[in-house]
Amino acid sequence: MTKFVTLLVEDDTVQRETFADLLKSEGFEVIECSTAEAAELVVATSGAELQALVTDQNLEGNMSGAELAGYARWKFSASCPAGRHPGCVAILAEQSSWAADGE
């Protein structure tokens, strides 16, 4: 049985590594990217093995997490006869302003 493959996109190294370790400890296979542009290449070359996309909203580079999720949705809906990728989930995360201010 193949593992549940998750694409994790986060530009903060500590947060990405911490979350990746958590996912791996739960049995997930994790592909890590620090930019949406790098993740876009992974999505472009992936098939049904990619089952989840977890991404920060505000990433370094020219593409946001929402734009990446939109691309993934388009890519998988275009490649599936039923019009959708079975089981592919996109999760967007954004640090709230209160947390950034240290409150």
Image: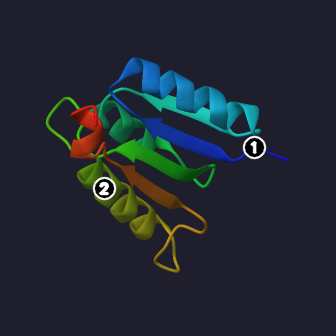
Q: Residue at x 46, y 41 (%)?
A: 45
Query: Which residue appears at 28% of the width and 37% of the height?
Result: 103
Q: Earlier in the sequence, mark 1 or mark 2?
A: 1
Residue 34 at x, y percent in the picture: 36, 26
Colour scheme of this structure image?
rainbow
Residue 13: x %, y % from top left: 40, 19
Q: Residue at x 63, y 26 (%)?
A: 21
> Looking at the picture, does residue 38 appear above or below residue 28?
above
The front one of 45 and 56 is: 56
Q: Could you tell whether 51 is left or right of 66 in the image?
A: right
Where is residue 24? Give x, y as percent: 69, 32
Residue 71: mark in rendering: 2
Query: In the image, 9: left or right of 85?
Result: left
Height in image: 4 above or below 89? above
Residues at discs 1 and 2 in contact (Cβ within 8 Å): no
Q: Residue furthest left?
A: 62
Query: Quadrant location of residue 10?
Result: top left
Q: Is residue 51 left or right of residue 101?
A: right
Q: Quadrant of residue 99?
A: top left
Front residue (pair 26, 73)? 26
Give the residue type that dot 2 points to.
Answer: Tyr
Where residue 91 sits, quadrant-wise, is bottom left
Amino acid type shown at disc 1: Lys
What residue would you read off at disc 1? 3
- The percent position of residue 88, horizontal first and vertical second, equals 54, 61
Under circle 2, the secondary element is helix
Q: Which mark is residue 100?
A: none
